[in-house]
Amino acid sequence: MSSAKNININLKIWRQKNAKAKGSMETYKLNNVSTASSFLEMLDQLNEQLINEKKEPVAFDHDCREGICGMCSLYINGRAHGPDTGTTTCQLHMRKFNDGDTIFIEPWRSKAFPVVKDLVVDRSAFDRIQQAGGFVSVNTSGRTIDANAIPIPKEDADKAFMAAACIGCGACVASCKNGSAMLFVGAKVSQYALLPQGKVEATQRVLNMVRQMDEEGFGNCTNTGACEVECPKGISLENIARMNREYLKASLK
Amino acid sequence: MKLDSKIPEGHISKKWTDYKDHLKLVAPNNRPKIDIIVVGTGLAGASAAASLGEMGYNVKAFCYQDSPRRAHSIAAQGGINAAKNYQNDGDSVFRLFYDTIKGGDYRAREANVHRLAEVSSNIIDQCVAQGVPFAREYGGLLDNRSFGGTQVQRTFYAAGQTGQQLLLGAYSALSRQIGLGRVKMFNRHEMLDLVKVDGKARGIIARNLITGELERHSAHAVIIATGGYGNVYFLSTNAMGSNVTAGWKIHKQGALFANPCFVQIHPTCIPVHGTNQAKLTLMSESLRNSGRIWVPKKKEDAAAIREGKLKPTQIAEEDRDYYLERKYPSFGNLAPRDISSRAAKEVCDAGHGIESNDTNEGVYLDFSSEIQNKGKQSAYAKGNHNPTQEEITKLGKQWLEEKYGNLFAMYQKITDENPYETPMKIYPAVHYTMGGVWVDYNLQSTIPGCFVAGEANFSDHGANRLGASALMQGLADGYFVLPYTVSNYLADEIRTGKISTETQEFIDAENNVKNTIDRFLNNNGTKSVDHFHKRLGLIMWNKVGMGRNEAGLKQAIEEIAALKEEFYKEVRVPGSSDELNPELEKALRVADFIDLGQLMAMDALQRKESCGGHFREEYQDAEGETLRDDENFSFVSAWQYNGNDITKEELHKEELKYEFIKIAARNYK
């Protein structure tokens, strides 16, 4: 793009050999970074430099680089996915930084997300919560009822979609002082609670998912709201409230 | 080798039903004795693993990402086709079948495509039952929109995140089976070889990407659902980790590779910004429902825009060339992808490109007309029959935001420009690969017991895929085809018993993988893996890209051979084998891309015709459209591996027969 220029930056990056090793912040200098580059392209450039200097490149998670797979993470200057709002790290661009800036890059920090190496963490706890109840128990058949047999009010469908837009990146957990996963779980519970297809198993679903969430070591919600602020997909706190109502309803049955 | 496509006899509309009725079954009590491996957890892999798990088989599923939910199906934006005819605009199974065959420029198999159209409706029913939140109208019923290459509204969608919602649906079904213990999931594992015993697929060697450990896994059938190979171009809309390794490993073991040169270059992607770029981003085809594509008629205007002296909004209506509307009036901005991409290249090659980068390659996708149209409609719907210009513009923008909000936001993040105010800049980029592992009607490769599904196979899209058909195919294969055809194969395996991983075949396969890894780590070269990958990508884009010719293809074959030699001599892979080592993962993948790239050039060279996305400059009509040669090239090219020198691969041909569709020149004018 025509407005792009090159900047020089300093990087302070968390390096940790593996899950058991002790980590530390290391300093790197990187020159000629185009402001049109994405943040991860900047890290690619750093790794190319490190490989050429016969040093170990920095490990970080990433895949689609379109802000949808949820694989990228990173705590950048003390914020999940960096300074931009409504953005995953892969969609953060270097035009948000200035020449001479020092940028701090750390992994997600949470008991339930142990560091695997450098900036890579293990988020399989999210998968296990989903396996505990994040589904409708319908087998593949091709003989379910016609898709238009049950009309669903547009407003409900839209709300369910907005909850289902969660990408499972874990920024909510990383941003929460309690390491709570309530926004993630609340979004999944809400998607199904808002749709007639999800009503049948509503009671068991919320109980099972919350039980698994607790077992994984995630903390409790104290309504700080940091999760909503840092969520790259704008998942609303409403979903936590809805989950709480669902949980209460299920517990009283 | 004789290729048997195993297409059943009978009328096209009865083939699948009759065939299914006569397939062999495995009784429920026998299924737990049988192991199945599924590699890849995108739409095809996740739906296959979930369905087979539900049936009672022991399934092991593998993905290289940290969770099955990350597979790149998740990035599909626009929608999924189904012949529901909810809009009462004349759609039917036959029409979806016909559009897909025609869209593929008559290079796909009739029987497979008809089956796809038949099960399309079941897919929507299944997904809604799973709680997939598709877009709805105010009456509560499902909404539809149009996609390229069709004249009906048959595309179901969830904003610009249809792939995400469908994948999360399949992931939820898969998660349920994992929770029930019917599927064992191996995240962060990469398949690095297929193990054959007595000619049959019997297992895989997988690397645990965290510990580096090589693992042997045995099974009675192996399903490869690992997506496409667009990353052979380095820059593409694929995920960074998308790769051809699983498909290439089975190719080396005897599975033929079909139509490798059929690549889809998608017309609407964000243009390249510079040399450090690692990937390209798609702007959904659905935007062509609302956006008009144009470039300045005058070259001096284009130059002034590139220099920043003029803004697109300053170009008068009569000085704009809406070239798709001009050339293809009946389909207009919704012409198929291959045609739209080539048209963009043509106007840019002629000096009308508007992007200020090294190549000037970019055209406009303009929403200003739609803002006016929809703004007026919205005002009327609200009872305001005399809206001011300001009200119209405001309502029009609101309408766009509701339809495409996430895409517009993504565009703005990447380019720092506001597409509500100024037209988007777009240019074609590599997006999808129609070619893939050759499979028969059962989706079985030429290796017994090794099935291939989704984008990884070649079967349904011919030489060009229509929009919103990839999601359809992935789910059709996984939910509604493989459960039948894999069971038919497994019916003969109920007495086999557990397959040992201690046999010589497994030991040899593991040693081979280990040697390859050690060779890279001990190579001590001077250049990074990306260095080679980028060079491969440039050769591919320039010579095996949107326009191809004999001289260029011959050069590409030689240049890739030289690159391969240099790669093995000079590549530097840091770190060790017993840890998370992304550079090692990349090296193993790029090694396979280099081989594949050469085969793609060979395939493009032998196909002396133009069809779909394969445009040989020597074969075009007077108006610059593709010129097919049905007499000599109405076949699937299927390549057989023949050792490390790829130029020695042997070409087999599967003749394509059109019994139910009259083959004609493709016309969208």
Image: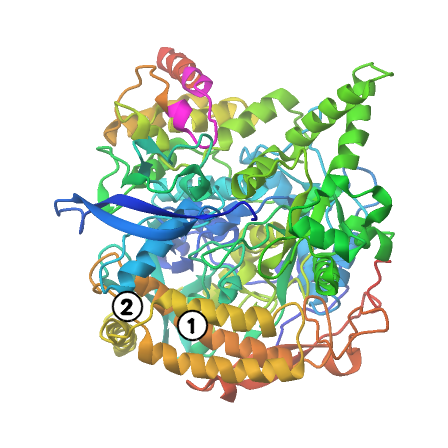
Taking the view exactly as shown, the residue that stands out farthest to the top is A252
The kind of residue tagged 2 is Val
A171 or A75: nearer the eye? A75
Q: Is residue B316 left or right of residue B485?
A: right
Q: Amino acid at mark 1?
A: Asp
What x and y, as percent, mark residue B231? Answer: 49, 63
Determine the residue positioned at 81% across, 54% down: B297
**Any part of residue B211 in sight:** yes
Residue at 66% across, 43% down: B424
The residue sitting at 71% across, 66% down in the picture is B612
Q: Earlier in the sequence, mark 1 or mark 2?
A: 2
- Tell me: residue B392, above or below residue B434: above
- Residue B250 is one of the magenta-drawn residues: no
Circle 2 crowding by C-alpha within 10 Å: few under 14, some 14–19, many from 20: many
User: x%, y% of residue B477?
Assistant: 57, 56
Residue corresponding to mark 1:
B592
Near-viewer residue (A229 or B308): B308
Q: Residues within 10 Å of mark 1 (few under 14, many from 20)?
A: some
Q: Which mark is residue B1?
A: none
Q: Which residues are magenta?
A: A227-241
* Chain under numbered label 2: B
Q: Is residue A91 left or right of residue B263?
A: left
